[in-house]
Amino acid sequence: MSIPPSPQTARLTGRGCYAADAPLEKPLYLAFLRSPVAAGRISTLAVAEGLATRGVHAVHTGTDVDHLGDLSVNPVIPISTPLAYPLLAKDQVEAVGQPVAAVLADTPHAALDGAEAILLDVPDDALPPPRTVAAQRWQAGDCEAAFDQATWVVDVTIRHPRLAPCPMEPRGISVDYDPATGCVTIWHATQTPHRTRSELARMLSLDPSRLRVIAQDVGGAFGMKASLYPEEAIAVWAAFRHRRSIRWIATRSDDFLSATQGRGLHSHGTLALDAAGSFLALKADITAPLGHWMPHSALIPAWNGARTLPSGYQVGAVDIATRAQSGPLGPTGIYRGAGRPEANALMERLVDKAARACAVDPLELRRRNLLSADALPFKTATGNTLDSGDYTAALDRLYLNSDYANLRQQQTARRKEGELVGIGTAFYLEPSGSGWESARVTLHPDGRAEIASGSSSQGQARRETYTRIASDALGITPDQITVDLADTATCPEGIGALASRSTAIGGSAVHVACQAARARRNGGETGVITVEERYENAGQAWGYGACLVMVSIDADTGVTTIEKACCVDDAGVVVNASASLGQIRGGFAQGLGEALMEAVHYDADGQLLTGSLMDYAVPRAGDIPPLEIASLCTPSPMNALGAKGVGEAGTISAPIAILNGVLDALAPLGITDLDMPLTPCKLWHAMDAAKTRTSLR
């Protein structure tokens, strides 16, 4: 069965093929009975009433699936205590929303009715304390001596809110079972279709050839769709168990309850400076939350949140520790930035505090301490190589483009009038992915070219970008090129769309394959020419940039207004300028969400309090200010295109620039620290408390 890709016009007119749209013949629909408590032993699980519900075909519990394998986890930091991957809770529940029973029925409503008819009793247990699952530490230089010699020492604690990624399309999977072959075709809302196939084959003890995975249209992901979920594994297992097609489409509430969440890291840092304002030493301690099970990339935030320090700054000595801890909450995974925003927030908050302590302009202190262009490539204390760039040039461009000197003058004048006005700045690094990606190019005698990539797309204009790369490399027009993605039957095996890697690595694979094919044609070869490339980059490409916001705060209501926002970004060689700008703007919007309004909340019993978009605030169009974007271009030596990541720049830079701006605005009141999100209520209470302290003096 050949599945043609959906053109953009088809998606815009509602004719795309998302997981919920996949054509299935009389499928069974899947629904789950979920745990109502965060911790406890199952005392009663009676499924008879569920089975007796009209339209219900089967009910499965943990005993039916406990023989299946676990999900693999990327051990980027050493794992000391692996966590189980229960597809269905068997004896113990470990989080609100954990699947306990799976119901298969003729209609979605019948499946839900069947789930509601099951009798489940789980007496509440006390919530277990956090357990350290994985940890790592990096040390370089003599931190203690540096702190002893310091003129200034500043410290910062940042508690990031847990965030719900909220892509427009919730999770979903449709499994088409073919009784003639015993094989399945799976439409999966995923960033990693090849990983879906390999993980399912291993967990279900199946030959991978029996599984075809297609991620034709995916309505956003942001890291939430990077891993395989228990519900999705159950759907595929059930297709083979019952020899029927199966469909499961999550509701928004399902996603709030059981999809991976992001952020939530707690970090503490201390920075030592000498009399000239040079950074002598950094101590940092990072604690990253995990849920009751780990998705494949669960440890990436803990890793990135530490190893990205001390950003692009020259620091004489460092002592950086990170740990990931499990708990009775929803699972935590990668979310756009995945530890990079957290590392950047800690470092840039320290720099702003240091600037205030030293009485030095924040941009100037950054300029003094950033690595110089001729110091790159630079090996960091955490074992990373910063590849190329001119970090101070980004600050200089930001200074000019924002009219920084004039903004400071305006701020001084407005403060004299009693206004609360602040300017927040931030430098940032954006490490993109490393490793390999694949491409296959087929040239036809009539001049047509077919490109197949192991990468995938969830709205990043991937086909357009790869078409441009192929057009330039082959010397043909874009209308002669077709691009196939995210189908394990028609595309070479690949990694997928993760960590801003798809242009730098996936695009390089396309570029190299096209160059080889063109060389064969130029060499006189006739007929159909096919070249397959498994391209591996030389190392991570490190994008970078700087961001500025000017904010004002209403003293009566606590409402923050972003009056000006501008950024400078260096993503190396940019293939698709409009897509790159869109990525920065979209990332800025999500970064603003964390800074000002988004937070997942649980009560003391582990009950989710923000289970819908009535409770969980996301930015709307009117909340996003105009963003002025300037670009630099320092090619990366780490890949064939010279490209760097850009997809996470906004989420890395915007939150801390806004936080720094708000705290700068509140500095005259003596307010020095606040946690995001900076809601009007939180700011009003902080200002009220500051006024009370002043009146008591």
Image (spheres, helix red, strand yellow):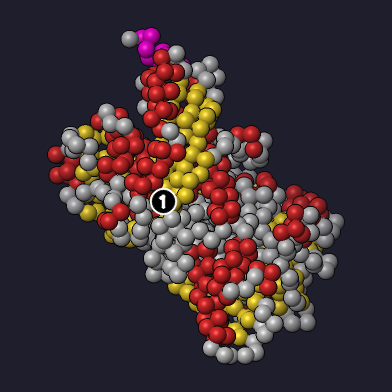
Q: Tell me, yes or no, whether the highlighted magenta stretch contains residue 299.
A: no
Considering only vertical position in the picture, is 485 above or below 293? below
The residue closer to the viewer here, 475 or 84, is 475
Quadrant in which the C terminus is drawn: top left
Mark 1 belongs to which amino acid? Tyr
Q: Which residue is drawn at 75% across and 49% down?
A: 116
Q: Residue at x 63, y 50 (%)?
A: 167
Whether residue 49 is visible to the viewer of this picture, yes or no, is no
Q: Which quadrant of the figure has residue 612?
A: top right
The x, y position of residue 39, in whole percent, is 54, 47
State the SS at label 1. Answer: strand
Q: How crowded is mark 1: few (under 14 residues within 10 Å), some or many (20 or more)?
A: many
Q: Which residue lies furthest to the right in this view?
A: 54
Considering only vertical position in the picture, is 630 above or below 641? above
The span picked out in magenta is 688-696
The x, y position of residue 694, in whole percent, is 37, 12
The residue closer to the viewer here, 434 or 192, is 434
Quadrant in which the N terminus is drawn: bottom right
Query: Residue beneath label 1, please?
Result: 544
The x, y position of residue 463, in whole percent, is 63, 64
Whether residue 395 is visible to the viewer of this picture, yes or no, is yes
Q: In this view, does 242 lie to the left or right of 338?
A: right
Q: In this view, does 454 lie to the left or right of 384?
A: right
